Image (cartoon, helix red, strand yellow):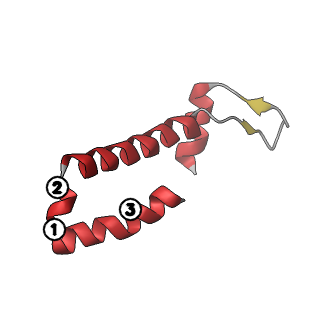
Amino acid sequence: MILATFNCFQIPFDVAFQPEFFQTLSFTMINSAIDLCFLADIFVSFRTTYINEKTGAEVKNLKDLAKFYLKG
């Protein structure tokens, strides 16, 4: 939540004002690290099992997990 909140303020501020500080190497590395955290979250989310409501069994098959999460 902290990273998402940071992005909610940083991205519009960067687009509107383009401050020089946002172009520094350290700030670019911080933004890249935040993006990698979100990417890792996507991978972890797709590996999270769920309980099939019809059978009550835990679904662990990657194909079935992808179908479930992409279906919404």
Tell me the distance, in whole angstroms, between the alpha carbons under discs 2 and 1. 8 Å
Quarter of image, res 23: bottom left
38 or 68: nearer the eye?
A: 38
At numbered mark 3, what does the secondary structure look like: helix, strand or loop? helix
Quarter of image, res 66: top right
Residue 18, image x and y in percent?
16, 68
At numbered mark 2, what does the secondary structure look like: helix, strand or loop? helix
Mark 2 and mark 1 lie on one chain; the one further toward the N terminus is 1
- Relative to residue 72, is residue 50 depicted above or below? above
- Kind of residue at disc 1: Gln
Residue 36, image x and y in percent?
39, 40
61 or 29: nearer the eye?
A: 29
Q: In this figure, which residue is indicated by the disc labeled 1?
A: 18
Residue 62, image x and y in percent?
59, 26
Q: Residue at x 69, y 27 (%)?
A: 60
Mark 3 and mark 1 lie on one chain; the one further toward the N terminus is 3
Characterize the local packing of mark 3: few (<14), some (14-19) or many (20 or more) Cα atoms within 10 angstroms.
some
Q: Residue at x 28, y 71 (%)?
A: 12
At numbered mark 1, what does the secondary structure look like: helix, strand or loop? loop
**Are circles 2 and 3 on residues that touch, CB within 8 Å?**
no
Mark 2 and mark 3 lie on one chain; the one further toward the N terminus is 3
Q: In this figure, which residue is indicated by the disc labeled 3?
A: 7
Q: In this figure, which residue is indicated by the disc labeled 2?
A: 23
